[in-house]
């Protein structure tokens, strides 16, 4: 289980501080496919990068499986990241390595033996229906195939969690459905808990059992996906669902959400 308790994140720059997250409280249960939805700049990617400490919170605590990971360093941090797979919008594959070598990379980092690494990689490539592409290079694959390789690589260390940061936004509609169905299959068959960052309501509706809506660094709504879609409680969520709301500027220059 993942818990975020009063988590905030501030970026310091010469031009001034930027608060990306404030007072975030979330609970992600084991087995969830948990969606975090919001517009660009809402804080989605910052939030997900806190979960494996690619970014560190400025305040608050992050609890994973009962342990406060907020100050992890060294060996503890390496073990944490081995337990949390991550896939990205741009696939982040090594172009100079074959498909097989991309999938074995996390195992090599942990010092696994070459034959055992290759065996594990072939198992995962079969899982994502790409074992026949093992000797190819990423540039020879379609976008959907590259994302499947990235998914296989993220599973190499048998993680308990997988973070998906806009993992389908670079794909066409048909390929998006295929990748989402694969993620759902992995969740069901392997028990991998998933956190899905997306701006797409269609993605959330298809694959997530619970969602949280984030706006300007704050969680404005959370609940079962079906409940949030059927009866949104916040103006921001209604706007995202296009329930006759829109953003507009007030006379004093501030932005608000109003009924269209």
Image: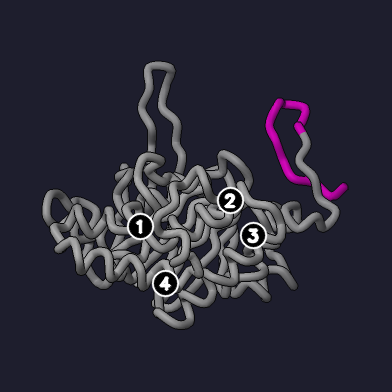
- The label nearer to you, 2 versus 3, is 2
Residue 51 is situated, as x and y percent measured from the top left of the image, at 35, 55
| Distance between the alpha carbons at the discs numbered 2 and 4 | 27 Å
Neighbour class for label 2 at 10 Å: few (<14), some, many (≥20)?
A: few
What is the C-alpha distance between the residues marked 1 and 3? Answer: 23 Å
Residue matched to label 1: 100
- Identify the residue under disc 2: 142
Disc on the earlier residue, 4 or 3: 3
Q: Which residues, given as a range, are shown in magenta?
A: 249-260
The question of residue 257 being in magenta is answered with yes
User: 129 or 186: nearer the eye?
Assistant: 129
Label 4 and label 3: CA atoms lie apart by 19 Å
Query: Where residue 166 appears, x then y in whole percent?
Result: 55, 51
User: Who's the residue at 52% across and 46% down the image?
Assistant: 140
Instruction: Looking at the image, tell me whether mark 2 or mark 3 is earlier in sequence order.
Output: 2
Q: Earlier in the sequence, mark 2 or mark 4?
A: 2
Quickly name the residue at label 4.
Answer: 193
SS class of the residue under badge 2?
loop
Q: Earlier in the sequence, mark 2 or mark 1?
A: 1
Image quarter (top left, top right, bottom left or bottom right) of the N terminus: bottom left
Circle 4: is it few (<14), some (14-19), or many (20+) Cα within 10 Å? many
Q: CA distance from mark 2 to mark 3?
A: 12 Å
Real-space CA distance between mark 4 and mark 1, rounded to the nearest whole angstrom = 25 Å
Query: CA–CA distance between discs 2 and 1?
Result: 16 Å
Q: Is residue 70 above or below residue 224?
A: above
Res. 84 image quadrant: bottom left
70 on left or right of 25: left
Residue reaching furthest to the right: 260
């Amino acid at each position: 289980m993942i818990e975020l308790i009063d988590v905030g994140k501030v970026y310091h720059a010469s031009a001034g501080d930027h608060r990306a997250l404030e007072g975030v409280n979330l609970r992600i249960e084991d087995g969830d496919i948990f969606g975090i939805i919001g517009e660009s700049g809402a804080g989605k990617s910052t939030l997900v990068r806190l979960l494996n400490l690619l970014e560190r919170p400025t305040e608050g605590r992050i609890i994973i499986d009962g342990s406060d990971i907020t100050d992890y360093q060294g060996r503890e941090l390496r073990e944490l990241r081995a337990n949390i797979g991550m896939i990205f919008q741009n696939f982040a594959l090594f172009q100079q390595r074959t498909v097989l070598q991309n999938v074995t990379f996390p195992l090599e980092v942990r010092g696994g033996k070459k034959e055992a690494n290759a065996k594990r990689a072939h198992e995962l490539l079969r899982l994502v229906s790409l074992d026949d592409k093992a000797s190819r290079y990423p540039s020879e694959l379609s976008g959907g195939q590259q994302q499947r390789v990235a998914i296989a690589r993220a599973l190499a260390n048998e993680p308990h969690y997988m973070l998906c940061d806009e993992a389908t936004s670079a794909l066409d509609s048909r390929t998006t459905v295929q990748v989402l169905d694969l993620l759902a299959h992995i969740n069901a068959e392997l028990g991998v808990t998933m956190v899905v960052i997306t701006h797409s309501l269609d993605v959330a509706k298809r694959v997530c059992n619970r969602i949280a809506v984030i706006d300007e660094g704050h969680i404005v709504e959370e609940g079962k996906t079906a409940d949030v879609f059927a009866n949104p409680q916040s103006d921001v969520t209604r706007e995202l669902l296009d329930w006759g709301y829109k953003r507009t500027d007030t006379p004093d220059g501030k932005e608000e959400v109003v009924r269209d």
